[in-house]
Image (spheres, rainbow, N blue to C red):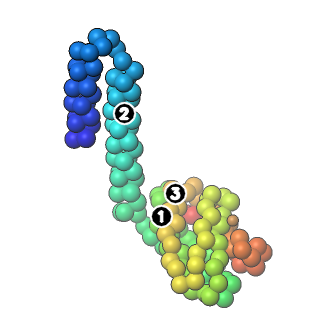
Amino acid sequence: MRIILNIKLCLKGAALHNMFVNQISSNKIGCWKKVVSTAAAFAILASLAVTSTSYATDDSSELRFSNGRFEPPMLTLPANRPVKLQVTNAGNAAFEFESFELHRERVVQPGQTITVYIPALQPGTYQFFDDFNRGAASGQIVAR
Ligand SMILES: [Cu+2]
């Protein structure tokens, strides 16, 4: 609806402009650019909506962090489908859930639960750790 409105405004603006100047104005071009970018924004929003809808039906799993340890230290997830991983910090200090292999890095405050979107994984093992205390706490996700 906004796109149509913008086009209408463009046409009206262009007609008025042509009456006075009688040539193609840079204004007109700028106006059409706006229409195109609005359309692009709508397309992006539409694709985001599709993405979030597909996640809504995905599997979910939970990981807890407390007393400097991940529970469970080995988490099995289904391979080849996205998973919503809920990561809870049950401890009293912030930690950072990090995985090089999964390209994820999220700080979790004490008492907070975050959702980490895990893409469809190939079967295999993926390491993760607390980047605030490297070497202290780590775990792995096994996709199968
Ligand atoms: Cu980090």
* Nearer to us in this view, 85 or 10: 10
Residue type at mark 3?
Answer: Pro
* Nearer to us in this view, 48 or 144: 48
Which residue in the structure is indicated by mark 3?
119
Q: Quadrant of the C terminus?
A: bottom right
Mark 1 and mark 3: Cα distance apart in space? 7 Å
Question: Measured along the vertical axis of the image, is residue 14 above or below residue 35?
Answer: above
Label 2: which secondary element? helix
Q: Dot 2 surroundings within 10 Å: few (below 14), some, or many (20 or more)? A: some
Which residue in the structure is indicated by mark 1?
83
Mark 1 and mark 2: Cα distance apart in space? 37 Å
Q: Nearer the viewer, mark 1 or mark 2?
A: 2
Quadrant containing ligand 1 reads bottom right
Instruction: Say which quarter of the image contains residue 10.
Output: top left
Q: Residue at x 49, y 69 (%)?
A: 115
Q: Position of residue 81 (x, y in %)?
A: 47, 58
Q: Dot 3 surroundings within 10 Å: few (below 14), some, or many (20 or more)? A: some
Name the N-terminal-most of marks 2 and 3.
2
Q: Quadrant of the N terminus?
A: top left
Q: Which mark is residue 34?
A: 2
Q: Nearer the viewer, mark 2 or mark 3?
A: 2
Residue type at mark 2?
Answer: Lys
Name the N-terminal-most of marks 1 and 2.
2
Q: Tell whether circle 2 marks a residue whose Cβ is less than 8 angstroms from ligand 1.
A: no
